[in-house]
């Protein structure tokens, strides 16, 4: 799997409906969903998540699960995901992770590398929903402003982080994807060798 050196703009996406819904999520819901998340890492000290889908133990993207919120949000999330990944030309896309991430105004996500086993096997996609000119994404020592209404693939296995220097919380829809047809072929090949 080839990841971009830092950030690659994939496509413009219509995320207006998703943005409206994300902005309506109450602080009580953000807090409750964040308390349940599996990705409770120190670098996210000022970031809250609503996790729709996740990889069990964050190891094998073929071992993912959906939270109850996925059923309620899928009809709005799926068109955004499909539009974002169109440039890949996948025949059987699989989405093991999907979440909203809110970086609080005036705070940051510390530089880190996503080192668990699944990260080298998936494409990490960010779709900014609510942002401002002072919200930046740092990858490999470079700063990028990710514009709302576009989907970006980010290299999450190199040093990356974010800062929100604005007065408004930044909300991104983040998901991961891989080509399921390829994974099926690999599994079939592994069994044929045995």
Image: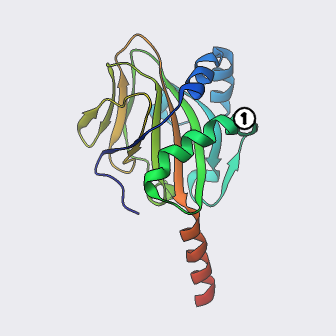
- Asked if residue 154 is positioned above or below residue 88 in the image, the reply reads above
Q: Position of residue 135 (x, y in %)?
A: 35, 23
Q: Residues within 10 Å of mark 1 (few under 14, many from 20)?
A: some
Give residue 144's quadrant in the image.
Answer: top left
Q: Position of residue 96 (x, y in %)?
A: 60, 51
Residue at 51% x, 44% y is 83
Residue at 38% x, 41% y is 112
Relative to residue 125, is residue 80 drawn left or right?
Answer: right
Q: Foreground residue, 7 or 114?
A: 7
Q: Position of residue 175 (x, y in %)?
A: 53, 43
Give residue 37's quadrant in the image.
Answer: top right
- Whether residue 147 is visible, yes or no, is yes
- Asked if residue 48 is positioned above or below residue 194 in the image, the reply reads above
**Element type where label 1 sits in the image:** helix
Q: Foreground residue, 161 or 90?
A: 90
Relative to residue 180, is residue 121 drawn left or right?
Answer: left
Mark 1 — residue?
Answer: 69
- Whether residue 38 is visible, yes or no, is no
Direction left: furthest residue: 141
Direction bottom: furthest residue: 193
Q: Quadrant of the N terminus?
A: bottom left
Q: How many marks?
A: 1
Relative to residue 163, is residue 18 drawn left or right?
Answer: right
Residue at 62% x, 28% y is 34
- Asked if residue 121 is positioned above or below residue 74 in the image, the reply reads below
Q: Position of residue 163 (x, y in %)?
A: 35, 25
Residue at 57% x, 83% y is 189
- Asked if residue 179 is positioned above or below residue 194 in the image, the reply reads above
Relative to residue 168, is residue 81 drawn left or right?
Answer: right
Give residue 191's quadrant in the image.
Answer: bottom right
């Amino acid at each position: 799997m080839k990841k971009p050196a830092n950030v690659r703009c994939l496509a413009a996406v219509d995320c207006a409906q998703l943005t409206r819904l994300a902005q309506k999520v109450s602080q009580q819901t953000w807090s409750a969903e964040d308390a349940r998340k599996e990705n409770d890492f120190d670098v996210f000290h000022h970031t809250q998540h609503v996790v729709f889908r996740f990889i069990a133990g964050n190891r094998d993207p073929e071992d993912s699960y959906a939270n109850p919120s996925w059923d309620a949000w899928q009809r709005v999330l799926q068109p955004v995901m499909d539009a974002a990944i169109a440039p890949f030309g996948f025949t059987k896309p699989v989405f093991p992770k999907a979440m909203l991430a809110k970086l609080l105004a005036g705070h940051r996500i510390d530089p880190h590398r996503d080192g668990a086993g699944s990260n080298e096997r998936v494409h990490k996609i960010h779709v900014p929903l609510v942002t401002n000119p002072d919200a930046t994404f740092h990858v490999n020592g470079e700063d990028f402003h990710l514009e709302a209404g576009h989907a970006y693939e980010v290299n999450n296995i190199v040093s990356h982080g974010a800062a929100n220097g604005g007065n408004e919380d930044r909300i991104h829809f983040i998901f991961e994807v891989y080509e399921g047809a390829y994974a099926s072929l690999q599994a079939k090949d592994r069994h044929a060798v045995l």
